[in-house]
Amino acid sequence: MLTLGRFLSHLLLFMLAVATSLAQQPAPENTDSLELARRYLAQDKAEAALEITDRLLARPGLSSAQKAAVMESYLKAMKELGRKDLPPARKALAKVLADAATDTRRRMNIWWHLGVLTHNQGELAEAQHYFEKALENLPPGDTESHYWLLMSIGVAQVQLGNFAEATQSLLEAERIHDRAGMPPNYALYQNLSGLFYYLKDWDKSLEYVKKALAIANEDSHEYTWALFNLGDIYYHKKDYKNAYRYLKATLDRTPEDPDAWLVLGGVLLELGQHRDALDALNKALKLYQDHGTLRDLGLTHRHLGRTWSSLGNHEKAIEHFRQALSLFDRQDSPPERMQLYKELADELEQAGRYAEALAALKKHEALHDKLLNVEIKARIAKLKSLAELEKKKRTLAELEKKRVLDRQTITRLELQAAHERTLRWFLLAGLVFAGLLMLLLMGVARLRKRLHQELRSQHRDIEALNQKLQETSVRDPLTGLYNRRYLTQEVDALIAEREGSADDERQGPVLVILADLDRFKQINDTWGHSIGDQVLKAFAETFSHCARRSDIPVRWGGEEFLLLCQDMDIHQGAKLCTRIRRQLSELEIDADGHPLHVTCSFGIAPLPVHPDLPPHWSWTIKLADAALYAAKSAGRDRCVGYALRNLPPWLDDDNLDVPRLLSEDALWVIEAEAGEHT
């Protein structure tokens, strides 16, 4: 009944804060200012720690290792302050430093803190990616961090609606928790209860929230929160007696909780206690008027309208339904408005205001048609995809079953033929019987031949289906471009081929182009994710159209794309980026009747980064990412390429310090519009 966000929002912040605080810090650096910032963090003076680390990050001359240590404390201070304004430039620098950090735990902590801050900014998919990066850098044997990271990933997946993946992550976290013998954990049980709440598995949700209640301190906010959750779940189970009991217990502890008054009003309405329902809903309305959201107020007015309708006062019901409509109009909630128009039409008809009832009903039908069209299209697409997958699985299962049956048939026929050969020795006395036996054996042979032919045909069908499934597994479902799995295979093969070739064999240059759509988050925030998906598909089409047939276009992640180009140097790559930008500038996307133009920034790096070095993929990606960051910092809608000019003596396999290379003029730098080295 309540906003589903309330069920998890406080719990997510609690869980993520506790989780990140558990990550152990590496040995402190010999930097007085960094030590001071860490002391401030230990003393809960995050604001002072943030000021110090912010100044340190702006100080020139720090090595990459020192910057990584400072960045770790900077992000932790931002996280402890609950900040939602992490600057994009700092985020980009944090990613570079995380990749370059030699300390495994520091890499994990930077990715982890980045995930929390990105989650605070509402970028759930990006936050999940950072949590997964932290998990990849988990130090061996750190069971507790493994547990909390799986919890963080599971919570993000729940909020993204990826319930199957969320179930796997959270249940795996529970298994780790139980195997390690950790004490019962409130956050774990509330998160699992929230997951099953979303899945509408009320019994499982109830089971876990009762576990949370059993370990919560009776004087704590967590205990009150668990009481409210019990009341809300019982309301959805239509067990109104228990719902009433737990909601009253909640209000005895927190009488100013508008959510509890709202759910209690719904319970009383279902129990037929209309006057008591009015009192509860009016209390909720008064409390929401001080600090409630538009949705909270809209839901309260809607339930007040239903209550007055049950009391037979159609005019008051109409008044509350109209106020609810006005509030849902302001927050653009078509499903709620559609249902409200229907309820309003019913009340207007009961009041004898037929013209107004007809107008409300027409608005209901218009919204219904619009929503139904969108929902049906999405559902049809989803069902088609699921049906195709199920059909493929069923076909493979049926073919396998038929193949087993065919094998059994052949075995049975072979046994029968052997038996008949034995009988033949007993039937040689009669020529007629011998002839009949020969005919029978010929028929068996023909049957076996036909069965073998059918089996070969079925094997070919299975191989074709497997090939199609393999193709699906290496494609991004939204853009149709290759995904990271395919790119990894191609890069591994390319590097193996080059490392295995003779030194005197001529090898053409290989180039990596990273592309990132400019201000894509602003597009999603302004126009919605459906327009954002249109932008991604339109860019992917332009990206692959401009590429050569031999190039490999990949969706790198989110709004980032990658192009792997063989036999292409950095100057040719810059020209290719210019061609993509030119075609992109001519692209116009219809955003609900408004023309939308997009731009893109590019970062280029060769593989290997210098002709005298082996093909080191992580260095190429790091250099291309740094070039992309430079393009973004220079104003976006441009291309920047980096390549090693010479080999500094301090360079080794574990150290590619891009800021230092730039400061020592050890890099070739090329811009798309300059067309020459600078």
Image (spheres, rainbow, N blue to C red):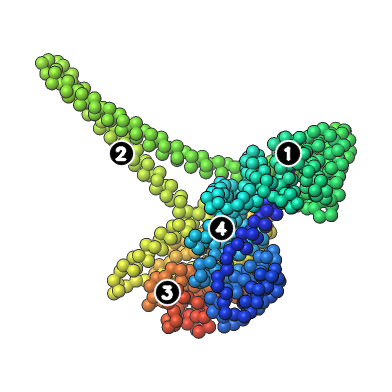
> Where is 214 relative to 97, above or below?
above
Residue 235: image tag: 1
Q: Amino acid at mark 2?
A: Arg
Q: Quadrant of the N terminus?
A: top right
Residue 106 marker: none
Q: Residue at x 74, y 53 (%)?
A: 220
First-in-chain label (1 vs 2): 1
Image mark for residue 653: 3
**Mark earlier in primary sequence (4, 2):** 4
Q: Which residue in the structure is indicated by mark 4? A: 144
Q: Residues within 10 Å of mark 1 (few under 14, many from 20)?
A: many
Q: Residue furthest bottom?
A: 664
- Percent coordinates x, y for residue 9 in the rendering: 69, 53
Residue 256 position, x and y percent, is 83, 50
The mark nearer the N terminus, 3 or 2, is: 2
N-terminal of the pair, mark 4 or mark 1, is 4
Badge 2: how crowded within 10 Å, few (<14), some, or many (20+)?
few
**To which residue does mark 2 refer?**
456
How far separated are the C-alphas under marks 4 and 3?
Answer: 32 Å
Asked whether the residues under the numbered discs 4 and 3 touch, taking CB atoms below 8 Å apart as contact, a structural biologist would say no
Mark positioned earlier in the residue sequence (1 or 3): 1
421 relative position to 262: left or right:
left
Residue 43, image x and y in percent?
Answer: 69, 70
Residue 57 visible (yes or no): yes
Question: Which one is in front, 210 or 661?
Answer: 210
Q: CA distance from mark 4 to mark 1?
A: 36 Å
